[in-house]
Image (cartoon, grey):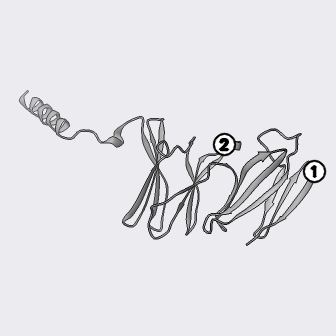
């Protein structure tokens, strides 16, 4: 009878001296999204109310709290990684599509957030295409290079027969040109390098 009581006392003492860690919160969890070549990306869901992104590489790290940065989120996930950037989709639904770009320079200390309707991103060229504005029946797109921050401005007429949150039928982007199809017609735009 004394042995079970002694065991119970030891377990009780151990529980009091080792409080549960924060990761044991059943309403919060961390998912490893990427782990390759010394680069690790984890996304933590904090009690279904906020997400944070933690990036670590060698002895360097960066943590971004999406709530604190006023970045809208749905279910963040890593879209692509190349040698220069990490692209994380924070919201992926129609005109609310948003991405967070983290430069992989010498230090992990910065991020790029474009608070616009992201239409397309490219991991090969580091280009991003987004809707800047829709004014006076004109759609104004921006093709921006994340590395140089150079921008190509593109405008074309809005098709009044399309739903309000769709600005074209389809598009095709190559290194030097953008073709947009809308209302059965194509518009070709030569891109500046």
Residue at x 85%, y 41% (from the top left corner): 162
Q: Residue 112 carries which label?
A: none
- Dot placed on the residue nearer the N-terminal end, 2 or 1: 2
- The residue lying toward the viewer, choosing from 160 and 59, is 160
In this rendering, is residue 95 above or below 146?
above
Q: In this view, does 176 lie above or below 43?
A: below
Q: Name the residue under label 1.
A: 184
Residue at image point 81% right, 55% down: 155
Q: Is residue 139 above or below residue 128?
A: above
Across and down, in percent, residue 151 comes to 70, 63
Q: Residue at the right extreme?
A: 184
Spatial CA span between label 2 and label 1: 26 Å
For disc 2, the marked residue is: 96
Which residue shows up at 45% across the image and 63% down it?
Answer: 108
Most distant residue in the front direction: 136
Question: From the image, which quarter does the N terminus lie in?
Answer: top left
């Amino acid at each position: 009878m004394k042995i079970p009581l002694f065991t119970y006392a030891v377990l009780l003492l151990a529980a009091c001296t080792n409080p549960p860690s924060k990761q044991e919160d059943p309403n919060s969890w961390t998912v490893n999204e990427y782990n390759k070549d010394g680069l690790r990306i984890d996304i933590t869901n904090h009690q279904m109310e906020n997400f944070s992104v933690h990036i670590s590489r060698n002895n360097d790290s960066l943590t971004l709290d999406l709530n604190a940065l006023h970045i809208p989120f749905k279910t963040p996930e890593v879209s692509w990684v190349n040698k220069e950037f990490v692209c994380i989709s924070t919201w992926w639904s129609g005109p609310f599509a948003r991405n967070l770009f983290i430069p992989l320079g010498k230090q992990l200390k910065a991020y790029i957030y474009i608070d616009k309707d992201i239409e397309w991103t490219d991991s090969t060229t580091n280009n991003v295409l987004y809707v800047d504005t829709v004014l006076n029946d004109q759609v104004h797109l921006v093709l921006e290079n994340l590395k140089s921050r150079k921008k190509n401005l593109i405008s074309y007429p809005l098709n009044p027969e399309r739903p309000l949150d769709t600005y074209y039928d389809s598009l095709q982007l190559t290194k030097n040109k953008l073709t947009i199809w809308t209302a059965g017609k194509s518009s070709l735009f030569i891109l500046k390098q």
